[in-house]
Image (cartoon, rainbow, N blue to C red):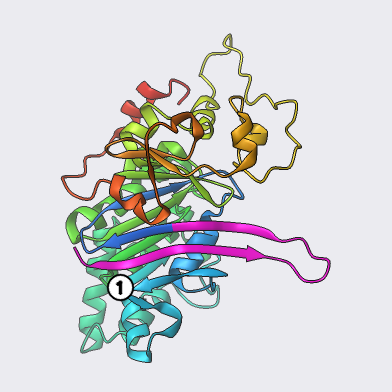
Amino acid sequence: MPVLLEARSVKKVYGGGLRGRRMTAVDEFSLAISDEPSIIALVGESGSGKTTLARLLLGLTEPSEGEVLYRGANISKLSTAAKREFRRDVQVIFQDPFEAYNPFYKVDHVLETPVLNFGLAASRPQARRLIEDTLRAVGLRPEETLGRYPHQLSGGQRQRIMVARALLIRPRVIIADEPVSMVDASLRATILGSLRQLHDEFGISLIYITHDLTTAYQISQNVIVLYRGLIAEAGDAEMVVREPKHPYTQLLIGSIPMPDPHHPWKGEEAPADGARETEGCHFAPRCPRAMPMCWQSQPPMYRTDKHRAAACYLYRDAEPLAGVEIDKVLIRKGVLEPHGAQRFAEVTPGV
């Protein structure tokens, strides 16, 4: 299957200089998105490198090491024509639906601009019909949406307009960076449904970036769990959530409180050497199962199941994988079925 978008051993380091402290936001990350439609969730707490990865994949940030490829070519070296094709094939939906708008323009402006820039319609009436049809596709009524300013619409409406904007261009991949984190819980299902619709009806791949395992489980086929720029665990969403292997993933699942006032919620208990520096596993200072080898070197990804791998020495007897081989454990084919809130509740009673 031809590879559309690929991150190959990408690393991003900030800071440095004479006295500046260097901070590695993304470390040796590899992932390939083929023409086969898929939904991959990148999950992790704040500071895990999720947004930096999104910027790297979009070409908004240059990697310190490694490269991001579009159809086999480095995106930083694309010709003008190839960059235009890349911008059409790879679209983004950002976290804050309000900051994406210019408050002096009506919302029509964000929809008319891509139609004009990419020549999607031959006339103004045709452009209007295309915009209206796309708004309906994401659950919005054109008569209640067009002609208004951003502040006259709800957060959910503004975010769905951004989904419609991405859909207008008919991209091959949409990178959705925390698309539901700033809207009411009652609207999240609607927006997630719109994203699923893009995948199911239009064959668009989604890279869904979130800190919320609930929505990641509901929408995705595969989950990649990040910790301080490194992949901790990756694979089939069902397996990663139901039977997490990496101690960090177990912590994420276990930290969800149960809806029982009589059930104590302990959260995370910091280990005694939590402040200790390490050249090994980034999670070792917080890991309750850290071993001496964990402090000495970073563990590789071990293939714990056919469709799952974890970067943890607890599984050192399993097959090790190189970073570029993480795609071997991801599900690429087959019908994508939604997991749903009820099934997630069965796994994590706290939801």
Residue 54 shows in the view: yes
Which quarter of the rendered picture does the N terminus lie within?
bottom left
Determine the main secondary structure of the stretch shown in magenta: strand
User: Residue at position x 31%, y 75% from top?
Assistant: 72
Q: Is residue 28 magenta?
A: yes
Q: Is residue 203 magenta?
A: no
Q: Amino acid at mark 1?
A: Asp
**Residue 81 x %, y %:** 33, 89
Residue 97 shows in the view: no
Q: Which residue is mark 1?
A: 89
Instruction: Examine the image and state in which quarter residue 317 appears.
Output: top left
- Identify the residue at the far right of this view: 19
**Residue 282 x %, y %:** 61, 43
User: Residue at position x 20%, y 59% from top?
Assistant: 36
**Residue 145 x %, y %:** 37, 65
- Residue 273 appears left or right of 89: right
User: Residue at position x 50%, y 60% from top?
Assistant: 53
Instruction: Examine the image and state in which quarter residue 170 appears.
Output: bottom left
Residue bounds of the magenta highlight = 1-29
Q: 255 or 295, which is in the foreground?
A: 295
Which quarter of the rendered picture does the C terminus lie within?
top left
Sort mark 1 into few (<14), some (14-19) or many (20+) by Cα contacts within 10 Å: some
Give the secondary structure at mark 1.
helix
